[in-house]
Image (tube, grey):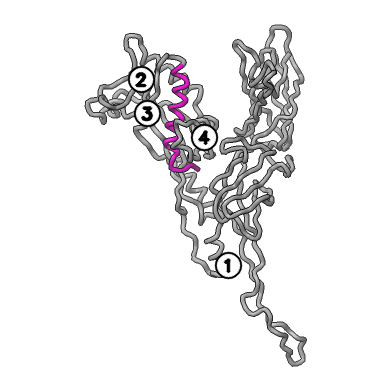
Amino acid sequence: MSNHLAIATVTACLQRMLQASVQLDIDGARVTTARPNNLGGGTPEKGINIYLYQTTHNHIWQKNSEVQMRRTRDMAVKKSRTALDLHFMLSFYGNEVELEPQRLLGSAVKTLSDRTLLKRETIQDTLADSTFSYLSESNLGEQVEEISFLPLDLSLEDLSKVWSVFFQTPYTLSIAYRASVIMIEGEEPATRPLPLRDRSIGSWSLFNRPLIEQVTSTAGKFAPIFSTSTLVIRGKNLKRHQTKVRIGDLEVSPQNISETELIIPLEPISDKTLQAGVQSLQVIHPSPENPPTGNGNQPPIPTHGQPTQLLTQPRVFSPTIESNAIPFILRPIITKVTVSKLEGREEERRSAQIKVRVNLTVGKHQRVVLAMNEKASQNPAAYLFEASSRRRDGTLVTIPIKNVKPGEYLVRLQVDGAESMLEVDSDPNSPSYNRYIKPKMVIR
């Protein structure tokens, strides 16, 4: 889920994406986010203006969100969620004689055709940009639901209605896009818990329930998380006499524990017990055995003809307390790449089977995609291939490839969107310094 900065973060990401593209296509073009008024609106003389003219509820996602809240075990503490679609008007300004507005329109359409999904890396780069320092607390990158940009087929009448709200502002060449879906989470619980039947058991649990606010790596807020990373869990009420962290179906003990922060290294955990992709994390306070509420030091009382008995009270157990669940992405690391069953000769395109071994378990039902980028200075080829269906979980994935140009390729593996990283040459004396160097493979 995302906080109140989600809407502004989407707009900033869109502005940054378009600015990177149009400045290469049309020299001096700027991308702004001003209200398109005729006077003093701040729109560019040459460039694109982005204006969020409408927000609507996404009823499909909203309904699914409500169903999920009703079905969850800890429904009493789930926060309210609102699913929104954002409607943007992109207006194009410039020299009409040189067709600059039309060239800018083509540049924007090209960019949003190539980048229909707002990737987590784009969000992180935008939040790290000092221009958008006011968005530093945004957690849009933690939203599990994907955000896509789709063009809207508005008629001239619809466009006229939108532009009519700007008094005495002449129409300029425009196109509309919809960003869907943005899930904003509220601060208050979405449902009210049942009345307590026994305050000795339930009241302490409710008021001291652990709350997770953020999960990051010690390497940095936007640093990728691997099986060798150390996690920092920040929140409230995290410390108790026993504190565990649940990652998927696995429970582990934190290294350092305080009320607001837990430190947990992933490296001691066996890679085979961790699965690549989106992980669910919770803080668990296991249930302790409560002492009797009466006087536990009462002496034995003899009874006539009966064995001596102790006056004791039955033992009472408090329930296990679980925090809210927070997702984080665990990236796989490629350990070996093998090319087999190679077909094709000389100038022909090649077909083969690529076997990729990673350090983490890949589930048999997870979607796995192989990304290949040729190491060439001119017109490098790039391919995406999906892995074959698998019968069991494992660390080895086989991906068939077809019609591939011979050459040397850098290799990445995406497991449910969790992408492996490329290694950068850090040797200043190397000819490939500061460039990607591996993992790689050769298609001969």
Helix, strand or loop: magenta stretch: helix
Q: Is residue 113 above or below residue 261?
A: above
Q: Are marks 1 and 3 in contact (CB under 8 Å)?
A: no
Name which residue lies at 68% across and 12% down: 349
The part of the image, by quadrant, that contains residue 229 is top right
Please say if 22 is above or below 420: above
Per the model, the C-alpha gap separating discs 2 and 4 is: 28 Å
x%, y% of residue 179?
44, 32
The magenta stretch spans which residues? Answer: 1-23
Which mark is nearer the camera, 2 or 3? 3
Residue at mark 4 to residue at mark 3: CA–CA distance: 23 Å
Q: Indicate which disc, 4 or 1, sits on the residue closer to the N terminus.
A: 4
Compare residues 51 and 24 and report the one nearer the observer.
24
Q: Residue furthest bottom?
A: 304
Q: x and y percent of residue 361 in the render?
A: 71, 37
* Residue position for label 1: 201
Reading the image, the residue beneath label 3 is 33
User: Within 10 Å of the Cα at label 2, are there few (<14), some (14-19), or many (20+) other Cα atoms?
Assistant: many
Residue shown at 66% from the left, 13% from the top: 405
